[in-house]
Amino acid sequence: MALNILLLPGDGIGPEITDTAEAALAALDKRFGLGVNIIRRDIGFAALKTTGATWNAATEDACRAADGVIMGPTDTAAYPPPEEGGIGPSAHARKNLDLFANIRPSRSAPGAPALKHGVDLVIVRENTEGFYADRNMALGNAEFMPDTGTALAIRKITASASERIARVAYEMAMQRRKKVTVIHKSNVLKLTCGLFLDTAEKLGAEYPAVEVDECHVDAMASDLVRKPETFDVVLCSNMYGDILSNLAAEVTGGLGLAGSLNRGDDVSLAQAAHGSAPDIAGQGVANPGSILRSTAMLLQDLSKRRSDNALAGAAAALDAEIDAMLGDAGSRTSDLGGGLTTSAFGGMLAKRLSEGE
């Protein structure tokens, strides 16, 4: 059976790092017989130049048709206004494809540089509502100015979205260390955070084997620095998850190593956790670890959707080889004190994957 992977390189360092993901998939295909078929489409500035828009309906349809999607980072801050074709690919994909779960693991690889070692947690972030004004309304935008001196934003929290993301967290905890920490600020945001917390705690009754606790978001920022090893699955609304996952990533080695998977009922999209870094684009110094970790997450997710042991084996092999390379100072990129370029890291990884047993 073919495995159709849609590759969307993106902006800045996106083409460089997604090339390493494509090379890794080719090596894994050779080793595990996955039937990988890579389909490339432009997004971002490359698409704007050829189609007049950074994201379009044809790309959205291609995401639905593919078995999985790998999206490189995009430079949305530099895009022209929407009426001139500047459409945020990530926001539109998450909203229109209903990619309601953003899964962001933070794990310190053995022997690799990190602020804290022995950490293995995963942040489960609701991905479609909250304070994100570009995706939390069916029509219109949730950020507006009633006059030039006043700006307002609407935070949207629903019981339905809170329950489905909480279920993802509980199901994940059942496969891990059986602990969920719900993040909120219900002492101040009594209605919105209160609804998120209450919904998550009520659902917890369906998972008696899972220990459930809760933590204020500001306290959690401290705890992720002070004692990150004590957490297992961390359940967050959209903005809290966005911020805390970056913090957790820095504790365990940096955003360059942080995997990220956007998942819906029908589509899974792997995405680097970091931005497009236009200041270093084309220099060969970008760390491709994030997009590679995300690719491993995509393969693992597809293995569950398909009940496919070969895909599970490929995902485990990719993660293991990344760990092995990060554990050796001679096979790291420059941001981690090594001497490998982006392409050299990708080439070495592909070779190791091809030669693995």
Image: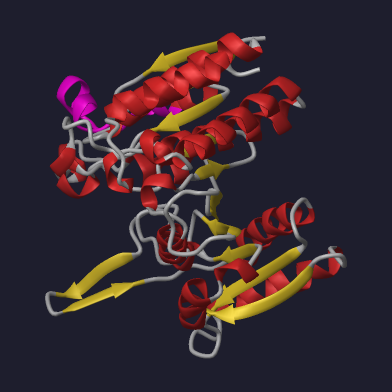
- Picture quadrant of residue 162: bottom right
Q: Quadrant of the N terminus?
A: top right
Instruction: Say above or below: 121 vs 343.
Output: below
Residue at 78 percent across and 71 percent down: it is 211
Residue 92 image offset from top left, x and y in percent: 39, 42
- Picture quadrant of residue 301: top right
Residue 199 image offset from top left, x and y in percent: 69, 71
Q: Quadrant of the C terminus?
A: top right
Please name the predominant secondary structure of the magenta segment in the image: helix
Instruction: Say above or below: 273 vs 11.
Output: below
Residue 269 image offset from top left, x and y in percent: 50, 36
181 in the magenta segment: no
Q: What span is in magenta?
A: 43-60
Is 235 situated left or right of 171 in this image? left
Instruction: Say above or below: 132 vs 41.
Output: below
Residue at 25 percent across and 35 percent down: it is 13
Image colouring: secondary structure
Is 149 situated left or right of 260 in this image? left
On the question of residue 74 being in view, the answer is yes
On the question of residue 7 being in view, the answer is no
Is 94 situated left or right of 10 in this image? right
